[in-house]
Image (cartoon, coloured by chain):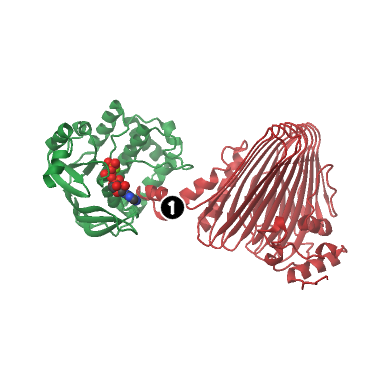
Amino acid sequence: MNVQIKKTDAEEGIISALKSAGANTAILDKGLPTRRVEPFHYTDLRNLLKSFPAASNSGEATTVDALIDGATISFANNAHTGGAFPAGVTGSVLGAPTPVPADVVIDANIIGDLNEALVANGVVIDIAPNKHIDEPIILAHNVSGGASSALRFAVSLGAGSSATIVEHHTSDGASNHQNTVSNLSLAKDAKVTWVIMQEHGAETTRLAQLNIHLAQNTDLTILVLNSGGKLVRQEIHMAVQGEGSNVTIKGVNLIADNMHIDVTTTLAHNAPNTNADELFRNVLTGNAKGVFQGQIRVSQIAQKTDAKMACNTLLLSDAADFSAKPELEIFADDVLCGHGATVTDIDKNHLFYLRARGISEKVARGLLVKAFVEEVFEDLDNEKLGESLNARIENWLDINA
Amino acid sequence: MIEIKNLHVKIADTDTMILNGVNLTVKAGEVAAIMGPNGSGKSTLSYVMAGKSDYEVTQGDILFNGESILEMEPDERAVAGLFLAFQYPLEIPGVPTMNFLKAALNSQRKARGQDELTTPDFIRKVKGAAQHLGIDMTMLKRPLNVGFSGGEKKRAEILQMSLLEPKFCVLDETDSGLDIDALKIVSDGVNALRTPERGFLVITHYQRLLDHIVPDSVHVLYKGRIIKSGDKSLALHLEENGYADVIKEVA
Ligand SMILES: Nc1ncnc2c1ncn2[C@@H]1O[C@H](COP(=O)(O)OP(=O)(O)OP(=O)(O)O)[C@@H](O)[C@H]1O
Ligand SMILES: [Mg+2]
């Protein structure tokens, strides 16, 4: 018997968006994923997503400062609003779906499916072999006015090339919906730093993916700072296909009252001698809810894999809640894999020590919280980038902690 | 300057009493020493003076220049001029020592209505104080006390004391963990701060510290009570004979 469940407002909204985009509505036949769908166990989209606004092909410029200087390609809702690529980069802005770079496998779930159906704009960037692009490329997307927007960024790095890419996501205070999928392909010996800087307004939803293919001897650093939004799901899916590659992921999730932020990473080691080091630090206030799911899969040929994953959380309120789900699936025998997840409160002995020196409780707490999260972005190769990320963190702590 | 009156203290949220009626007065310009067997309540007394919330005063009072401090927060006590050099200074990862020193110094200045120190003034001040105590400036760039040796931690405590210039200082076993030369350096640091306006309460197990920092009075704390007081010769007597006969006298 096929029981038809009544569609939620958000599901109705998505269906009408799919219809007006001329897309097939089949992806919503089963409705949005609920907690019974394993990867969405802690982020029950059907329950959490309250609405889905109509798309808009124009929008406001962001009022938020750039994270760092760079060549900025800007989007306001679905409209491209300006910017030029740095010298040496072949780039184009498409008013249409962008092709996926060779070898990148998109994780087929509702986030990828929605993007596939609704994508309205984006960029394609190709960096030629052996080109080193020093100027960061900033992909700035501002959503505003209670609209939905879906973009796709496709970036390919040729053999031996290097670049820094910054996704910068912002919005106003309206109920916006942002959906972005970034597809990144690294050819042999390529090196990339990819930053996801998310500082949405308090009512914006963001459902996003970053899908990455790594060939041999590649070097990937991903830096994530989530500090806004109402409901955020950031997925990062990585396939390490080449021997000798190195993956570093550092992230900070600053989750204020009533926000829900989910970072889900999957890392597949499919070649021997690869390293991965993943660290997330989270700070939650009020009724905030945070999720980290980290999967490491080591296939049988991936001998000598060295993969570490850590997720440390500081709860600044009893009502805040964090769920961490590390998952190791190891089919090779000669590997080093480890994970650790901790949830703590501010150490009251530390607090007392600082206060015994005349530092007020508020300032002392601030120092301790700051110490906890700012460690993550210390000692980056790009010092300026680390400082800017930490400045954003400090700003958030001043307001929220 | 400090009057501890009939102080009874228990561990908060329990019925376990630690201090059972401590009486002690230290006048401005004086150094009082407290000795006593392990577990007698010396550190507890120091923590209660500093305002640690693990303990609850059930009876009695602590007056600082005539006013009760029991209702004051730890930071308010520090601003008022109380300083505790911890027996076990805490390691605080992620907080560079210099940042901590600056926050402490400027918080106290601000609370007293003084201007905050500029960075160059601050660094000059720290350099001067560190040099006197044989502390290398590179150590102060590291996170607070993290990976410091036992002796380095104790020196760092005295560095904080000399920078903050408190009115009354409680030193809890500052001598333990110090090598012979460091003991001399640290004692000199303390002696340099001895003025007619400043008082000290020095907790120690060993007479040798009191050779350097000569006390005006010596008190024996036992089972949460001061069971004997005397002048500096009492410390010598304890060093020779241990606590047994002093304890026998009260038993
Ligand atoms: N927070 C606490 N919880 C439980 N017991 C405590 C606590 N604080 C102190 N005590 C107990 O109170 C007693 C006194 O401890 P305190 O640290 O004050 O002794 P002390 O005289 O400083 O000893 P030492 O010479 O070894 O430093 C000890 O038996 C100790 O175990
Ligand atoms: Mg003690």
Compare residues A300 and B97 and report the one nearer the observer: A300
In the depicted structure, whether residue A97 falls above or below residue B173: below
Find residue A295 and report its horizontal and vertical position in percent: 68, 46
Give the green chain's letter: B
Say left or right for A174 vs B1: right
Evaluate whether residue B26 shows in this view. Answer: no
Mark 1 = which residue? A363
Find residue A287 and report its horizontal and vertical position in percent: 56, 63
In the depicted structure, whether residue A320 falls above or below residue A13: above
Say left or right for A173 vs B47: right
Q: Residues within 10 Å of mark 1 (few under 14, many from 20)?
A: some
Evaluate whether residue B23 shows in this view. Answer: yes
Find residue B165 and report its horizontal and vertical position in percent: 29, 43
Q: Chain of mark 1?
A: A
Find residue A370 and report its horizontal and vertical position in percent: 51, 48
Residue at (83, 64) in percent of width and height:
A18
Say left or right for A344 vs A37: left
Query: Chain A's colour?
Result: red
- The secondary element bearing badge 1 is classed as helix
